[in-house]
Image (cartoon, rainbow, N blue to C red):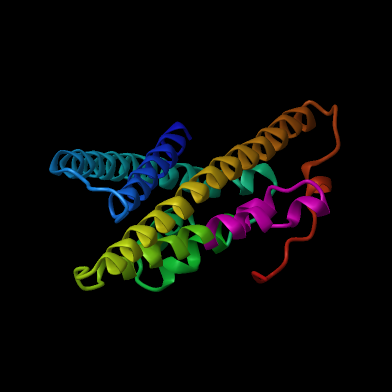
Amino acid sequence: MGFVGIASAALAWAAVQELRGLSLLDQSHIVSTLDLDQWELAVGKANELHLGTLIAAAIAVLAWLSRVVENTPRLGGGEPAASPRASIMWWFVPVASQIKPYQIVADVWRRLSSSPAELRVSVVRAWWILWVVGGLVDYVILWLPAPTSLADARFELEGDALALGMQAVAGVLLVAIVREVERRADLRANLRAEAMDGSSQPLGRLQPEVPAAEA
């Protein structure tokens, strides 16, 4: 998930650039045209970078999720709530895209768990809340009227920085989620190989009871 890590860093950098703009609105000192031009250039480049890396990260995440969903049954996790194809398509369905991807990730997280403690989806929930709320804040700021005062401009910059920061943290959590799911999948794959050799217990003994519905 290198692309996700890079995208998170790019989002954080874009947030820093937005916060830099707040210092330019400080009425205690005069800001030169050169300072403004340099800041606008930095913001433009930061936005280009984070948009480009987000696209690459999105492709990587969709490919990963589809593969995990496909592999879950053969790893003894039972039948996932969505098919590999549906795990991709739900991201592009209006309204449902704000709920279903989280449910799909939480479902495989639980299905690949090997103990009751691993059934908890707190980190998955935190990731999704930060990602969705950050996106909503960004959407609201985008549709606000053009600022007509310093207060309006500060509010817009602060909102942009908040949205970018939340999504950057969400990206870090997603990296942690991917690594943990891969660890669980590797554990099950190794146990499956050992079971085929007759040297370990069946994989079914690893499977805690997965809740029928998302809490």
Q: Tell me where residue 3 sits by quadrant.
A: top left
Q: Quadrant of the C terminus?
A: bottom right
In the image, taking residue 21 as reference, residue 124 lies left or right, namely right
Q: Residue furthest front?
A: 28
- Stretch of the chain drawn in magenta: 106-129
Q: Nearer the viewer, residue 23 or 195?
A: 23
In the image, taking residue 134 as reference, residue 195 lies left or right, namely right
Query: Residue 152: where, in percent of width, then height?
Result: 29, 69
Q: Nearer the viewer, residue 202 or 164?
A: 164
Query: Residue 23: where, in percent of width, then height?
Result: 34, 49
Residue 82 visible in this rendered orientation of the protein: no
Q: Residue at x 37, y 49 (%)?
A: 19
Q: Residue at x 80, y 55 (%)?
A: 208
Q: Nearer the viewer, residue 188 or 153?
A: 153
- Examine the rendered structure and indicate whether residue 109 appears above or below residue 180: below
Q: Tell me where residue 142 sits by quadrant.
A: bottom left
Query: Residue 102: where, in percent of width, then height?
Result: 53, 61
Residue 133 visible in this rendered orientation of the protein: yes
Count the numbered circles shown: 0
Q: Tell me where residue 59 sits by quadrant.
A: top left
Instruction: Please name the predominant secondary structure of the magenta segment in the image.
Output: helix
- Examine the rendered structure and indicate whether residue 208 appears above or below residue 2: below
Query: Residue 121: where, in percent of width, then height?
Result: 68, 57
Magenta residue check for 143: no
Magenta residue check for 115: yes
Q: Nearer the viewer, residue 138 or 2?
A: 138
